[in-house]
Image (cartoon, grey):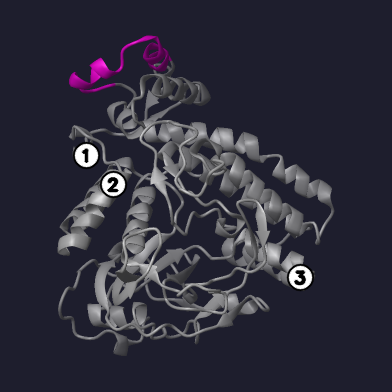
Amino acid sequence: MLDPSLLRPPYGHMTTEPQSTPFRPADDILSLPAIGDFVESAQFPRNILRFRNQRAAASVGLADLDDAAWIEHFGRFALLPGSLQRPMALRYHGHQFRVYNPDIGDGRGFLFAQVRDGDGRLLDLGTKGSGQTPYSRFGDGRLTLKGGVREVLATEMLEALGVNTSRSFSLIETGEALERGDEPSPTRSSVLVRLSHSHIRIGSFQRAATLGNTELLDALTRYALERLYDETPGALPPAQLLGRVVERTADLAASYMVAGFVHGVLNSDNINVTGESFDYGPWRFTPGWTPDFTAAYFDHQGLYAFGRQGEAIHWDVAQLAISLRHLCEAEPLIEQLERFPDLYASALARRFLWRLGVTGGDARAVAEAAVRAMMESGIGIDRFFHDWRGGSVRSEAARDRYQGEFWEAVRREIGECDTAALVDHPYWRQDAPCSMHIDEVEGIWSAIDQTDDWSPFHAKVARIRDMGAAMGCPPSIP
């Protein structure tokens, strides 16, 4: 259990969600040689708690912290007992928009602690905006408050839509005025803590391979299999690991599509070897099924456009295979890598039916017909899934939206499916779906920026969670 001295009498804001699992600290990352550098946190002039994820905190035994103790740990970074004794900035390389960069690493964050959840799964508490590290280059190591707000909104929305994502654990405003070229400055500052299933990236393997450090490559491979996948390394651990990464990342790419999400920066240093999405910068949700929709204003070639995300992630996983080539022959790695396209197509169809709330039938035919109809009609992704939840358009008023031959094809294909999800949750009786498009994000930020009004932000998080409860658990990977 957590050291009782850390649980101080509550004052100020204190939530009452019950503690659901004991606190179980870990420091497994220390088994990896030369994986990072010990660093210190920046000292911030203010610490104003803006968001604490009680649901996530309960899953790792930290829900009973009062706000003062929470700020001590996640704003001033007092160590969690039994975990890392100093924060660690991780070392990695990566392809950034297909250009290899060996001069990167954790430049404005660090691994603060490791913990285990109620199922014994190893998790990381990592930061964003916690100060400069050896990899900051010319950056200040800070995070804007707007960036922190955006990351909370992205992770909450993605979690509700069944995407395997890191969770925003804490957001604290830090009282500094930051200068940025891509938003009005000076702007407010923050520090974010995320709860993630590891921060070991494809870029971590690329660094070891580039340095010719086969000892580290082997250690990373075994760490990932044993500590992250809970598997015993078999006869060929590199191919074994690559197979798991192929499966998880193919599902991740498909989940982005069904959610209508564009990550924006799918560089190899942003792809976690557990297939968990994380690190949200210029993300967007596309209103319609628009393959060339991009999130990053600097993605001039559309490399990471909505419709190219499967291709982009597959390319990144190929870089992992190239790195693992230092440990084994190419043939078994190629065999695993070539599974990606079929796994991606199957995952997209499976997740498409899950979001519709139906089972059976020809899942790929349903998805193809619905995508074609959305593109032809301009009906939005969130609107379509909301109106058709359970396999048919329930609202009389909504039926006029779905006229024409393309929608008839959708009806025929869905007609072969069975209803799988209950639609009696109050969320499904709402006229409009819960969406997260750029105009609403900007409106939420404007209320905070102009009048320090956080009510739209908190209301949106509550509505997203309501939608998540109505959606239920996402499909598992077969």
- Give the left or right position of residue 328, taking residue 436 as reference: right
Earlier along the polypeptide chain: callout 2 or callout 1? 1
Where is residue 394? Give x, y as percent: 23, 23
Earlier along the polypeptide chain: callout 2 or callout 3? 3
Q: Residues within 10 Å of mark 3 (few under 14, many from 20)?
A: few
Where is residue 435? Give x, y as percent: 29, 41
Q: Which residue does the numbered mark 1 point to in the structure image?
A: 427
Q: Residue at x 45, y 75 (%)?
A: 140
Residue lying at the far top in this picture: please name it: 405
Which numbered disc covers residue 402? none
Which numbered disc covers residue 469? 2
Q: From what the image shows, is residue 267 above or below residue 430? A: below
Tell me the CA gap for discs 2 and 1: 9 Å
The kind of residue tagged 1 is: Tyr
Q: Which residue does the numbered mark 3 point to in the structure image?
A: 211
Q: From what the image shows, is residue 190 above or below residue 327? A: below
Front residue of 136/112: it is: 136
Front residue of 140/253: it is: 140
Q: Are marks 2 and 1 in contact (CB under 8 Å)?
A: yes
Main SS of the magenta part reads helix
Tell me the CA gap for discs 2 and 3: 46 Å
Residue range (magenta): 393-412
The answer to whether residue 464 is seen in the rendering is no
